[in-house]
Amino acid sequence: MTPDTSPAHTTHDAEADDRNDHIKIYVNGDIVPKDQAVVSVYDSGFMLGDGMWEGMRLYDGEWAFFDAHMDRLFNSLKSVSLEIGLGPDDIRKILDDTAAANGMTGDAHCRLMITRGRKAKPFQHPSLSRWGPTIVAIVEHSKPAQSLSAKGIRLATVPQVRGLPMSQDAKYNSHSKLNCVIACLQAEQAGADEGLMLDPHGFVNTTNACNFFIVRRGEVWTSTGDYCMNGVTRQNVIDLCRANDIPVFEKNFSLYEAYGADEAFLTGTFGAQTPVASIDGKEIGTGERPVTTRIRALYKELVARTVAEQKTARG
């Protein structure tokens, strides 16, 4: 097989947009120009990765699946005893105000970041964060690059694994992403775009940035969810399959099944469903992706329907 030497890309590649050089960013109650959006070097997120984040997309003035993202965010904040004194409606106003300041109503992506805040001394103990949380919202003009759907992502299985819940539960969307960064580096050094990570038992789990699915003989498979971020898009795909008579299973499976899959794709808020072209240099299927294509169409309809329902609910 001839090695794939095409340029690397990622599931977060976006079409170039010069407007992002001049966006305004929310930082702790103020919306400021990008070059003024700063936090303290004593911030617990900068020092320790002590914080949580969410990625959301803006469609027709609405943050798609907002409630699901807030359920995950506030569950995570509670789990690490990070009290921010705000509720989901307050978060929505922050995002809406930031988007409005940038003249955005769609084709925009938000990274909301909440840390334990500025520390009195540069040490670990959470009690040293004494001035309340740091809250930042970056909303960029963002359209996924068309090349992602056409070419697909090249994966390499990496030695870095997603660990057990008692080490660092992968269900946290935390600022502590070193585990995933290492996996990404390992994949890049192997000549791939992203790393395919196994769970502690050697079963296929997730990539360093997205949830992973395969299609075998018309069935859609993904991991059990025990060792990966339980993504909002991941759950939407599972629910769509169940509602549209597409057999779907959350189960353990090995690289053997992944290599022999007819199709494979990744899910995430930014790229929705991104095809996988190869795993460890082995091409996946024939390049035909009928099930992935159908799921993408169903997901697009779901987004439109959900956004319309959210607009109606908000009057």
Image (tube, helix red, strand yellow):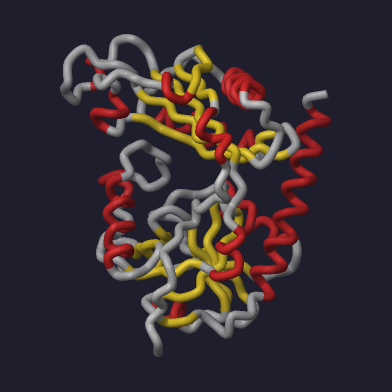
Left or right: 155 as drawn, with respect to 66: left
Q: In the image shown, does 250 or 237 lie closer to the viewer?
A: 237
Name the residue rendered at 33%, 9% in the picture. Answer: 131
Q: Quadrant of residue 158?
A: bottom left
Image quarter where the C terminus lies is top right
Direction top: furthest residue: 131
Q: Looking at this view, is 194 or 201 the one in front?
A: 194
Q: Is residue 121 above or below residue 161?
A: above
- Number of numbered discs visible in the structure rendering: 0
Is residue 309 shown left or right of residue 169? Answer: right
Q: x, y percentage for residue 135?
A: 45, 21
State the image coordinates of residue 234 (x, y, percent, origin top left).
56, 54
Query: How far across and how far down the image is residue 123, in percent?
Result: 16, 23
Image quadrant containing the N terminus? bottom left
The answer to whether one can see residue 112 in this image is yes
Q: Nearer the viewer, residue 311 or 237?
A: 311
Q: Is residue 197 left or right of residue 215?
A: left
Q: Relative to 179, is 21 above or below?
A: above
**Residue 14 to residue 247: above or below:** above
Q: Position of residue 169 (x, y in %)?
A: 35, 45
Instruction: Determine the residue positioned at 52% across, 49% down.
Output: 231
Quadrant in the rendering for residue 4: bottom left
> Which residue is farthest front?
18
Can you see residue 56?
Answer: no
Tell me the residue at 49%/31% (across/down): 112
Q: Is residue 126 above or below residue 108?
A: above
